[in-house]
Image (spheres, rainbow, N blue to C red):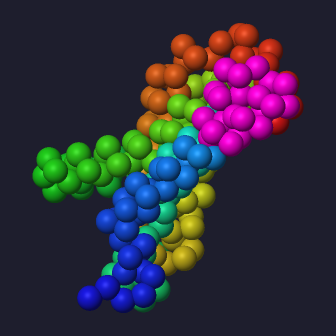
């Protein structure tokens, strides 16, 4: 039997359930933001694009961060563990088998992928793969430090930082064709 909020929301299935349930709300928020911006005089395409980017960054990033911040079975009872040697944890994962490799590597690549894909579309200053890599690495370091400080029974690993940043960088590279000059001129519009 599921007991308390942690039983529902503190599991992988709970995160997936909440993410799916939140999709209509995310769509509604995009629509409301775009409508308000259009009503204020912003070009319709710009209003929709900016609204989609803002909501998409949050909707596509928060569930992943929530999932990696879920405490392990011995959270609080064991000291934090740190792995600062690059590729050491990845080698351990490779030895665990193909399914574990796929879940770990793909999961880490997706953590900040929405941020990497959409942030350059929303923030002109981030319209650079190098800047997205730096932002994602910084965000990932914050998450890894939080895992350690909060003693979540997780390993704070440099490999996670590298994979999180790489995923954001690849996503930013994939969205480069939408970083148009005309949108940069529109970035000074209100809202």
Taking depth in this image into account, of 40 and 109 the one nearest to the observer is: 40
Residue 33, placed above or below residue 143 = above
- Residue at 60 percent of width and 58 percent of height: 142
The range drawn in magenta is 30-52
Quadrant of the rendered image containing residue 17: bottom left
Quadrant in which the C terminus appears: top right
- Residue at 49 percent of width and 56 percent of height: 22
Look at the image and say whether residue 32 sits in the magenta stretch.
yes
Outermost residue toward the top in this view = 181
Residue 43 image point, x, y percent: 76, 20
Taking depth in this image into account, of 127 and 160 the one nearest to the observer is: 127
Residue 101 image point, x, y percent: 22, 48
Residue 30 image point, x, y percent: 62, 40
Residue 13 image point, x, y percent: 32, 65
- Residue at 53 percent of width and 31 percent of height: 117
Quadrant of the rendered image containing residue 81: bottom left
Look at the image and say whether residue 107 sits in the magenta stretch.
no
Tell me if I can see residue 19 in this picture.
Answer: yes
Residue 121, placed above or below residue 140 = above
Left or right of residue 55: residue 96: left
Taking depth in this image into account, of 44 and 13 the one nearest to the observer is: 44
User: What's the magenta bit mostly, secondary-structure-wise?
Assistant: helix
Left or right of residue 20: residue 150: right
Residue 140, placed above or below residue 39 = below
Quadrant in which the N terminus appears: bottom left
Outermost residue toward the left in this view = 97
Left or right of residue 154: residue 43: right
């Amino acid at each position: 039997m599921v007991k308390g909020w942690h039983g529902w929301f503190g599991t992988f299935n709970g995160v997936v359930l909440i993410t799916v349930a939140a999709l209509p709300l995310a769509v509604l928020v995009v629509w409301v933001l775009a409508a308000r911006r259009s009503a204020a005089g912003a070009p319709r395409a710009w209003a929709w694009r900016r609204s989609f980017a803002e909501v998409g960054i949050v909707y596509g990033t928060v569930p992943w961060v929530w999932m990696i911040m879920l405490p392990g079975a011995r959270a609080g009872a064991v000291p934090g563990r740190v792995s600062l040697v690059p590729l050491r944890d990845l080698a351990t994962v490779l030895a665990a088998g193909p399914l574990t490799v796929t879940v770990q590597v793909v999961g880490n690549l997706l953590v900040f992928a929405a941020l990497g894909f959409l942030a350059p579309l929303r923030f002109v200053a981030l319209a650079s793969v190098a800047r997205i890599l730096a932002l994602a690495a910084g965000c990932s370091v914050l998450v890894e430090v939080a895992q350690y400080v909060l003693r979540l029974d997780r390993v704070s690993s440099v490999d996670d930082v590298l994979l999180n940043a790489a995923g954001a960088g690849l996503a930013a590279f994939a969205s480069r064709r939408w970083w148009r000059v005309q949108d940069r001129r529109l970035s000074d519009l209100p809202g």
